[in-house]
Image (tube, rainbow, N blue to C red):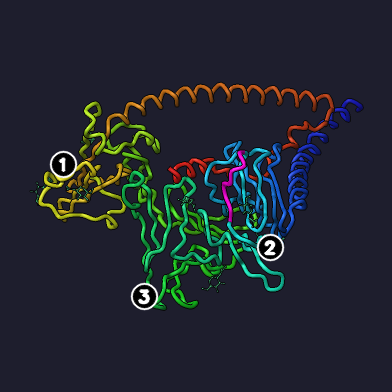
Amino acid sequence: MSSSTKMKKPIINVKAKTLLYPFLLFSAIIITLFTELAAAPQQLFKGFTASPNPTTPNFQPLLSDSTGNFSLTFLRVNQDQLALAVLHVPSGESLWQANFTEPTQWDKHTQLIFNGSIVVTNHHSRVVWSTNTDGDLVVLAGSSNLQILKGEKSPSVLWQSFESPSDTLLENQNFTSTMSLISMNGLYTMRLGPDFIGLYAKFKSLGSGSDQIYYRHRAMQAKANIIIGHGPILARISSDGFMGLYQNGSTPVDIESFNSYQRSVPGPRRVRLENDGNLKGYYWSSSSWVLDYEAISETCELPSACGLYGLCRPGFGCSCLDNRTLAKVDQCYQTQEIKDLCEESTNKKNKISEIRRIGVELPYKELMSYIEMTSFEECEKSCKQNCTCWGVLYNNGSKFCYNVDYPIQTILEVVGHESKMGYFKMWEGGKKKRDERLGIGIGLLSGAIIVLGLVIGFGVYKFWKRNKMVNNHNSILEKEDINAPGPYKDLRSSSFGSVELSNR
Ligand SMILES: *[C@@H]1O[C@H](CO)[C@@H](O)[C@H](O)[C@H]1NC(C)=O
Ligand SMILES: *[C@@H]1O[C@H](CO)[C@@H](O)[C@H](O)[C@H]1NC(C)=O
Ligand SMILES: *[C@@H]1O[C@H](CO)[C@@H](O)[C@H](O)[C@H]1NC(C)=O
Ligand SMILES: *[C@@H]1O[C@H](CO)[C@@H](O)[C@H](O)[C@H]1NC(C)=O
Ligand SMILES: *[C@@H]1O[C@H](CO)[C@@H](O)[C@H](O)[C@H]1NC(C)=O
Ligand SMILES: *[C@@H]1O[C@H](CO)[C@@H](O)[C@H](O)[C@H]1NC(C)=O
Ligand SMILES: *[C@@H]1O[C@H](CO)[C@@H](O)[C@H](O)[C@H]1NC(C)=O
């Protein structure tokens, strides 16, 4: 009898422990969150200064809105760099980031002050960002709009983050023709035209020429018309679940509806220009962001779904233009090695190879200009002789010759359409580098396998140890399990690469 009661004891312990673990973890997260938030004020006055705390793992709140759902923070990116961001606290999603002039370290000498302007200085005391205002007060409005106010009674807004968005547009934020959304990697931009929303890619080498448009949504003008010369249009996300285009007044000239159109949702809505060039809409469901809109729904229609010199087949996936198999995104060509073909053609050491393919077309050809030519040979010849031309696509049915004047991005594979063909130039220097990178990749892979082995080994050891503890009737919780990482999930590691890219 006595032995059977002894047997039961560990079982009860295990049960209690399984309940206790998530409870303690949850409490720990909630407590850290609320103690940190309690520390963040709801207004900043002149004379406010703050520096990042070296031990803060994810983000450090500086200013909170009245609900505690949004917070202006120092945000840690790429481990040791700092961004000034407005976060949606429950998800840790960054909704806005200050556009620093240079990458800034998470360093105790980096400083934010409010002296009428919000000014961020780096550890060399250089100003990396300033609002250039002379205000009295900083607040974070409930909509996540960071504002600098002037005056006591009925204060005026001198500056607001809603007027200089990053990659995200929030519910009720006015997006005007003087603004742009820029994806975190700096490659893609959203802007308004006289009667459309356009998405543009920075494919051309910097300094030479404009961005390439790859998506255009024209206003339908069903309920109201755009009157040219009567002011620019603006875009706004409605809480009713659509993105509206307006010219004057509150009647939209166009409605782009989301999946949750005319449904009330628990949390805020936002659209973001993603790093793949797509424009996506989300709403907060109280526990996660739900995707309810995509401007480009077919992966192959994205501006560069398979990277440089990639080939995308709808429903099939990526391969490479030059028939090498097993291509992953961005592996058909090494990005950093893109050169100006006009410079390279005078350099005899470098070779430019040619690729010809049938059954191919451009993903956004209706937005590309073309010239009518009688044959593919003529179309190809016009490209061969012109060093600003990277390739041509020809349709032997319509006789249209499309000129690509930027490094070849992903091309669409149209199986069975032998009348659609392409001719592409590829700078050979770039291919060699790719092979080197493959070597590095294999090195990294074996490193990762070793690390994985260690992790598994450690896990097995801990499992063994824990079982031993249970057997010993020992229910002490291991400390490291309580110190779980906070709720911040998406560090968007590419964000600073983007700053470098756009500043070059
Ligand atoms: C605030 O500080 C910055 C940087 O030190 C300085 O350039 C700016 O003139 C100051 N602004 C005001 C209103 O004092
Ligand atoms: C950041 O500033 C640079 C230089 O002023 C500009 O080219 C870039 O478009 C800005 N990026 C954003 C997201 O506003
Ligand atoms: C957006 O613009 C409308 C007028 O078009 C204005 O009534 C509204 O206050 C603006 N919203 C914000 C957040 O500035
Ligand atoms: C935070 O947002 C949620 C919806 O996502 C809302 O239900 C809640 O009331 C907000 N919190 C506060 C304190 O207002
Ligand atoms: C790639 O393969 C296809 C079909 O297998 C062939 O028609 C095409 O000529 C090849 N292209 C190149 C560049 O080798
Ligand atoms: C293009 O079409 C013409 C007929 O319009 C045909 O004679 C020619 O062979 C085709 N060229 C190619 C390369 O398919
Ligand atoms: C070369 O191609 C570019 C477009 O890539 C075009 O603007 C230019 O007129 C062409 N030059 C000649 C000489 O054909």
How far from the left and from the top, in percent, is residue 441? Answer: 45, 26
Q: Which residues are magenta?
A: 124-131
Looking at the rendered structure, the kind of residue marked 3 is: Gly
Q: Position of residue 443 (x, y in %)?
A: 47, 22
> Which residue type carries mark 2?
Asp
Which numbered disc, 2 or 1, marks the residue that appears first in the sequence?
A: 2
Q: Residues within 10 Å of mark 1 (few under 14, many from 20)?
A: few
Tell me if 170 is positioned left or right of 42 in this view: left
- Who's the residue at 64% across and 45% down the image? 488
Given this view, does label 3 or label 2 mark the residue nearer the observer?
A: 2
Question: What mark, if any, has residue 229 been given in the picture?
Answer: 3
Q: For the residue labelled by badge 3, is the local secondary structure a helix, a strand or a loop?
A: loop
Disc 3 residue lies near ligand 3 with CB under 8 A: no
Q: Is residue 361 magenta?
A: no
Left or right side of 4 for 131: left
Residue 85 position within the rendered picture, expressed as x and y whole percent measured from the top left:
60, 50
Confirm if mark 1 falls within 8 A of ligand 7: yes
Residue 315 in view, yes or no = no
Q: CA distance from mark 3 to mark 1?
A: 42 Å
User: Which residue bears the numbered disc 2?
Assistant: 136
> Circle 1 is placed at which residue position?
385
Q: Quick one: label 3 or label 2, which is nearer the N terminus?
A: 2
Residue 130 lies in magenta, yes or no? yes
Q: Which one is in front, 425 or 287?
A: 425
Q: Residue 501: horizontal and vertical position, in percent?
A: 44, 42
